[in-house]
Image: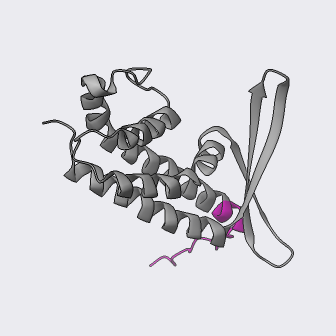
Amino acid sequence: MTAMQSEPPVAVDPAAHRRHDAHLFRGWVIDKFAQLEHALAPLLNDAANRPEYAALKPKFPHLAGQKFERLRKIAEINAPIGLNSARILKLLDRFKAFEILRGFLAHGTVETARTDAGRDIYIFRLVRYGADGPTYEQLVLTAEEAKAQQKHLRSTIDALISHLKRKSIST
């Protein structure tokens, strides 16, 4: 009978866990925004083919921000579209606060660190190119702040999606 050999214990790298958690947060947020874009598609397509929305340009918005702004404009137009416009506008006002976060997560880089107090932080860096050249921006969130953002974003987007699934502008 031979003796069983056990694997040596694997050292756990806390930095790897922080990076993993930061990427999970980033992926979750990006996916949540994508779910909203998906839920918006039927409404945006219907609106593009109705005369009361003909003035809205471009006919088919491409960028996420354009799609969310289009939903706002649709809700503001006083047409019988079957949406609770006041509710949509209120949710969009709550949602607007997350657009900056989305930009950093979708287009920025991420680093992680641990503060002297032992709190995990996620550092998102973004380069924006304007007419005057690049600007460098940074967003720092503690892991706890990221969880709080996730909770608020979930409730806001889920409410928007739920409302969009119940309503259609088609007659």
Res 68 quadrant in image: top left
Q: In the image shown, does 48 or 133 lie closer to the viewer?
A: 48
Residue 131 placement, left or right of 83: right
- The image's colouring method is one colour
**What residue occupies the far left of the structure in this picture?**
171
Expressed as whole percent of the image width and height from the top left, the position of residue 101 reads 62, 51
User: Residue at the spot x=40%, y=42% of the render?
Assistant: 76
Q: Main secondary structure of the magenta part?
A: loop
Residue 142: give x, y in percent of width and height. Answer: 71, 67
Query: Is 86 contained in the magenta span?
Result: no
Say whether residue 14 is left or right of residue 81.
Answer: right
Q: Position of residue 91 (x, y in %)?
A: 44, 57
**Residue at the (67%, 63%) spot, across then down:** 18
Residue 10 shows in the view: no
Residue sticking out furthest to the front: 78
13 inside magenta stretch? yes
**54 is higher (above) or lower (below) than 166:** above
Report which quarter residue 171 is drawn in.
top left
Region in magenta = 1-18
Question: Residue at the location (32% across, 40% down)?
Answer: 78
Instruction: Name the residue nearer the viewer: 87 or 5.
Output: 87
Residue drawn at the location 26% of the way across and 22% of the way down:
51
Look at the image and tell me whether residue 39 can be seen.
Answer: yes
| Left or right of 138, for residue 158 | left
Which quadrant would the N terminus be assigned to in this image?
bottom left
